[in-house]
Every structure is written in structure tokens, then in C-alpha cells.
Image (tube, grey):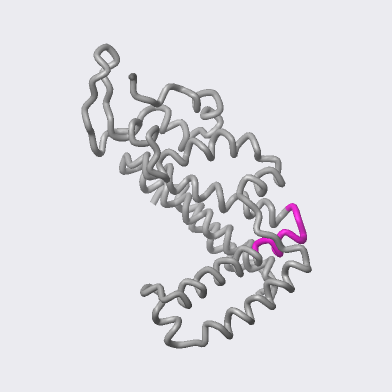
Amino acid sequence: MTELEATIFQGIDQLGLLGFDKHSYRDQIFVGLSVSILERCHAILVLVREDKVFDAQIILRSAFEYLVEAKNIIQSDDFHWNSQADFLKGMRLKLKAAEAGNPFFASIAAKISVAEELDKLAAKTSEITELGGKNLSFERKCQAVGMQAEYDSIYRSLSNQAHPTYAGIIERHFKIDEETSDFEVRGFDPASSLSWNVVVDTGSIRNSVYEAQSMPV
């Protein structure tokens, strides 16, 4: 185990020892977010060690989302109402899918009255809305903590590997001959210096994010 890994595990242990209010949603979500961030940092270390930098970018994007959520919780005493609104929205979507007969949620429909649960959820959602809870876009969350620049650069670039984007496919799987524009399809190739920069030095992405990532036409 490396020193950095040991620090991550120690951090998780310390979070478990915090004297937080276990009945406080705000405290619960902050501690949970913090543990998730550390876990993702460890996953990134493991992937980078195995030269799986492209996959590390996917985990890094997730860690970025958790970090922004945690920063919002820290900077606003009321932000947790938005987190609760997001949670309730997710529950509603799951129940509506069960009600519509989604086979993956058949067990839910078999165990509870979905209609009754939806009514309870609607009442709770109305309560949270009155307290200020909203379903915010991730960009709005970044703006709230002064991270619009990071959203426009680091976060957007990380989406190339998290989603089936043309730029991500090119970067990861096509080795292009600059003279002929012909290319080879590759798999499990070492990542480019740009991809390494995204993972180990996110500051550098601001100057390199617009480097050419498309195939010559």
C-alpha cells in the first residue's frame, strides 16, 4: 500500500469517528459524500497504476460531481434541501416506472401500493419545495460554488470518456496517421499526454482542452 492510499483509508476511518448528528440529513449527506470522494480517489489510483487512464477519467468525472455537491453543502446551510429534492425526484421516477410495469421494478410493485407511496412522496416533495428545495442542474451547482470555469473545461473534457462521444472514441481507439489521415483501430493503448494531464494535473487541461481531437476530413 502506498503512502497516498494509506492516507485515503485513514481519512475514511476519521470520517467514521466524526461526532456528527446522525439524524441530520445535512450531516449524513456531507459525510457520505466525503467517503465517496475518497473511495473514488482510490479507484483512480488503482486504474492509473494499471495504465487505465481513460477509465480513470470516468471515475474522476464522478468524483468531481461529488466534490461540487459537498462544496455546496459546506457553503450553504440550506443547500441540503436541494439534495433532498433530488433524492425525492429519483424515488418518484423509480415508483412511476414500477407503476408503468417496468420489469426491473416488478418486485417493488409486488411488495407495496405504488399509488399510496406516490401520494406520500408528493406530500413530502411539496414540503421540501416550500423549504426551498429545487432540482438544480449540475451547471447551476458549479456556478453556486464559483466553479463555472472548471465546469466548462475539466468537467466537459471528462465527459468524452464517460459518454459515447466522437472525440472520446478518437482519442481512445483511433491512431491517426497525420500524413495520410488513415487510422488504425486500437484497444488498451496507453493514454495520451493530454489524458494523463486531465487525471494528474487538472490545471493543465485549461490550456489543452481545445487541442485537436477530431479525425482529419
Above/below status of 180 relative to 111 = above
Above/below status of 22 relative to 55 = below
Q: Residue at x 41, y 33 (%)?
A: 195
Q: Which residue is drawn at 38% across and 43% down?
A: 164
Q: Residue at x 49, y 45 (%)?
A: 61
Q: Quadrant of the C terminus?
A: top left
Residue situated in front as seen by the camera: 134 or 149: 134
In this picture, residue 51 sits left or right of residue 204: left
What is the residue that sits farthest to the front in this orientation? 100
Above/below status of 137 relative to 160 = below
Residue 109 in which image quadrant? bottom left
Residue situated in front as seen by the camera: 188 or 14: 188
The total number of labels drawn is 0
Residue 19 in which image quadrant? bottom right
The location of residue 68, given as percent across then percent down, is: 62, 49
The location of residue 100, given as percent across then percent down, is: 45, 74
Residue situated in front as seen by the camera: 55 or 161: 161
Q: Which range of residues does the magenta coloring cover?
A: 75-83
Is 124 inside the magenta-drawn segment? Answer: no
Residue situated in front as seen by the camera: 21 or 142: 142
The location of residue 148, given as percent across then percent down, is: 65, 38
Q: Which residue is drawn at 50% across and 27% down?
A: 209
